[in-house]
Amino acid sequence: MINTYTAKYTKIDSGYMGQLVDWPEVVTEGESLEECREMLEDALRLMVEAFREQNREIPIGRALMEQMPVEV
């Protein structure tokens, strides 16, 4: 079965922080957006593997994010 998770990337001083909206414990950092994305995908695979080994329920990705413009 394939689940889809929503990733959120934040620019930080050292590069980027990536975190899954649907599974906030899956979080990582990378010097570039591409590196952060690759590391986040790897972290997700490792978390799925760990949860399976522990017979824990894997969170299902259901988040929907959208931009909301506002004049400031």
Image (cartoon, grey):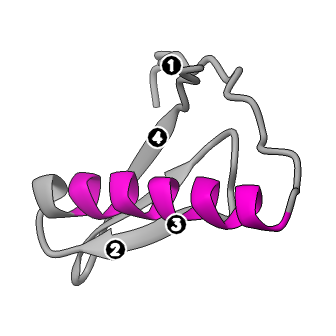
Which residue carries the number 2 mark? 29
Rate crowding at label 1 as few (under 14), some (14 to 19) or many (20 or more) other CA atoms within 10 Å.
few
Give the residues in magenta. 36-54
Which one is in front, 1 or 38? 1
| SS assignment for the magenta stretch, majority | helix
70 is higher (above) or lower (below) than 45 = above
Rate crowding at label 2 as few (under 14), some (14 to 19) or many (20 or more) other CA atoms within 10 Å.
many
Q: Which mark is residue 27?
A: 3
Which residue carries the number 4 mark? 7
Quick one: label 4 or label 2, which is nearer the N terminus?
4
- Report the Cα–Cα distance between label 4 and label 2: 12 Å
Quick one: label 3 or label 4, which is nearer the N terminus?
4
- Report the Cα–Cα distance between label 3 and label 4: 9 Å
Mark 1 vs mark 2: in front: 2
What's under tag 1, amino acid-wise?
Answer: Val
Quick one: label 4 or label 1, which is nearer the N terminus?
4
